[in-house]
Amino acid sequence: MPNHDRPSGRLALESGEAGSPSGLSNDFLSQILGLIRLAGERVFSLELAASEALAFEAGIACFHLIEAGEVLMTASDGRQVLARPGDFVLLPQERAHVLGPTDATAMPFTVALTRQLPGEVRLVTGMFRFEGDNLTSMLAVLPSLIHIPADTTDGDWLAGVVRTLLFEATEAQPGAAILASRMMDVLVIQAMRLWVRTARPEDRGWLGALADPRISKVLKAIHDEPFRIRTVAELATLAGMSRSNFAERFALLIGAPPLHYQTRWRLLLAHGMLQRSDARVGEVGRHIGYESEAAFSRAYKAQFGNPPALTRGSLG
C-alpha cells in the first residue's frame, strides 16, 4: 500500500485563524492530527481458536476489528482489554502486543495467515506506520491501547470503514491502493477523536489534554514557540488558571509536569535536527536554549539514553 503523503508542517506550528473557509474551527486538535501521515502496510482477516494466542512484533502500529468471538488484547505495557464483536482496538505506539490468553504460547501472526482453519475468533487487522517530523513525541504520549466498544457512538461507522478498507485492500480495483491508504488515515484519526470523547479523563493522556481548552492553549504556545523557555507561572497565566491548579491539571492530563514537557519537546526537536543533519552538537544545543554543550548533552542523554553525538546524521 503506498504512502499517503502530505506536508508534515513546520516544527513550530502556525497559530492559524479562528476559522477556516469551510467554517470548521482551526482548533489545536485538528492542527496536531493534521500532521499525521500514515504509511499503510497491509490489511487482512484472521481466524484463531479461543485457546490460541498471536504475537505482533514491535516496529509497526496496528488496529483490530473483532468480527466474531472475543479475545484478550495485551499491550506491551501490560494494559489489557477483552474485545468483543464490533469492538475496534487501536495500538498506536508501534510496540509489540499479544492477542489471546496470557497462559498460551503466542505464535507469530504470520503463522495464522498461512492456515485455512476456522476459529471461534474472527477479526480484521490493519498494519501501518506513522511518519512525520513531530510524530515521535506524539506517539510517546499516546495510550498504548485505544478501545472503542461496538456500542460507542460512531462505533458502527468505524466497523463499516474497516470492512470497506479490507475490500479495497484485497480487490484489484482501479485506484484501490490510494483509496485504502486515505481511508486508513481517516480511520485512525476518527478513532483518536472518539477516544477523546469517550475515555475517562485520567485515561485520555495527550489527546484529552488537547480537548481541554485551557491546557491545549498552553500546549499550542509551547509548540508554536518551542525554544522560548517559560516558567510555570507564565504558562499558568496563559491558561487563565492559578499556578497550583494549572500544574496539577497539566500533570494529570499530560502525565508530566509542565516544565518537564516543555524540556522534552525541545529535546525531541533537537533529536530530529541531529538525525537529519551533521550539525555540531553545541550548535543544536544553543539553538534549543542550552548555554553549554555539556548541559545539553547531559539532558539529551537523560532523555534518550545515548549522547547526542551518536544521533548526528543517522537519517543520512
Image (cartoon, rainbow, N blue to C red):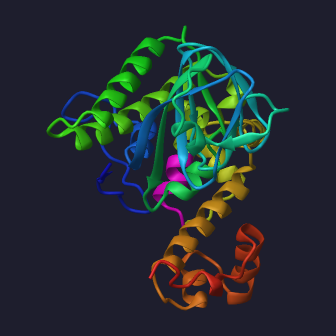
Residue 147 visible, this orientation: yes
Residue 99 visible, this orientation: no
Considering only vertical position in the picture, is 192 above or below 28?
A: above
Residue occupying the point 43% across, 12% down: 156
86 sits to left or right of 33 = right
* Quadrant of the image occupied by residue 204: top right
Q: Count the marks: how many? A: 0
Residue occupying the point 52% across, 38% down: 113
Residue occupying the point 70% across, 75% down: 300
Which residue of the protein is positioned furthest toward the right in this rendering?
Answer: 103
107 sits to left or right of 66 = right
Considering only vertical position in the picture, is 294 above or below 195?
A: below
Which residue of the protein is positioned furthest toward the top in this rendering?
Answer: 151
Which residue of the protein is positioned furthest toward the front in this rendering?
Answer: 116
Bounds of the magenta span? 219-227
Q: Is residue 113 magenta?
A: no
231 sits to left or right of 46 = right
Residue occupying the point 37% across, 37% down: 184
Look at the image and tell me in which quarter the C terminus lies: bottom left
Percent position (x, y) of residue 296? 69, 80
Considering only vertical position in the picture, is 129 above or below 105?
A: below
Percent position (x, y) of residue 87? 56, 18
Give 286 or 115, whichever is nearer the viewer.
115
Give 256 or 140, whichever is nearer the viewer.
140
Magenta stretch secondary structure, dominant: helix
200 sits to left or right of 43 = right
* Quadrant of the image occupied by residue 299: bottom right
Percent position (x, y) of residue 216? 54, 39
Considering only vertical position in the picture, is 151 above or below 76?
A: above
Percent position (x, y) of residue 9? 35, 58
